[in-house]
Image (tube, coloured by chain):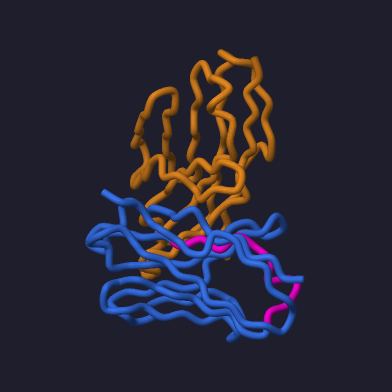
Amino acid sequence: EDQVTQSPEALRLQEGESSSLNCSYTVSGLRGLFWYRQDPGKGPEFLFTLYSAGEEKEKERLKATLTKKESFLHITAPKPEDSATYLCAVRLDGTASKLTFGTGTRLQVTL
Amino acid sequence: KAGVTQTPRYLIKTRGQQVTLSCSPISGHRSVSWYQQTPGQGLQFLFEYFSETQRNKGNFPGRFSGRQFSNSRSEMNVSTLELGDSALYLCASTNSDSYNEQFFGPGTRLTVL
């Protein structure tokens, strides 16, 4: 069965304290790994799509990387406004646009 | 470029009623997917529509249905509402040529009493 697991479930950081979120997957036929940010009561905001092992993408303080079994979202020198739930999702062969999501990591960044 | 819009933003219904939610995708996007988000189950795929045809369906009962119009706008309907249907319903729009980005709307918060 296809599985997407995110860890940790929750993470509390001080402003400026860099860390990484993990998304591990056990799937057949990966066609893309997506990262989203979601604020309470809002829809997920698209961050990145990664396609192949070794690929990296960056946006401001965020950097996403991909291996054959997992993806990391590195947050460098986070600020309080980076507080949100970070979701990863996979798109698989033959499933068109369907995304299978992990349960997310709730990130809180304090002053 | 306007984003994905969903209406209404909030709904309160009682058990047994039915509800229709609407989604307008980003201009030019012909694929619309629907998801249900609950605290216990997270984000779960309901179905996808492309060119007015349902192309993919998740593991939800037949009470959940949808349709897509020729302008790519989509609606989903839930009949005979149950308490467990309370959730945030999200619509996602994608460029079906590449599927490399999927953009979500703000969601409709449905509360079933």
Q: Where is residue B46 in the image (x, y as percent from the top left)?
A: 52, 71
Q: Image point 36% across, 78% down: which residue?
A: B68
Q: Position of residue B76 (x, y in %)?
A: 49, 76
Left or right: B38 in relation to A50 = right
Chain depicted in orange: A
Nearest the eye: A2 or B29: B29
Left or right: B104 in relation to A22 = left
Quadrant of the rendered image containing residue B89 = bottom right
Q: Position of residue B24 (x, y in %)?
A: 37, 64
Asked if residue A79 is positioned above or below residue B104 in the image, the reply reads: above
Nearest the eye: B1 or B42: B1
Q: Image point 43% across, 54% down: which residue?
A: B104
Q: Image point 49% across, 48% down: which residue?
A: A44
Residue B60, magenta (yes or no): no
Nearest the eye: B5 or A26: B5
Q: Image point 65% across, 63% down: which residue?
A: B87
Quadrant of the rendered image containing residue A2 = bottom right
Per the rendered image, the range of residues in magenta is B81-91
Asked if residue A55 is positioned above or below residue A46 in the image, the reply reads: above
Q: In which quarter of the image is the C terminus of chain B?
A: bottom right
**Chain B palette colour:** blue
Asked if residue B45 is positioned above or below residue B57 in the image, the reply reads: above
Nearest the eye: A14 or B73: B73
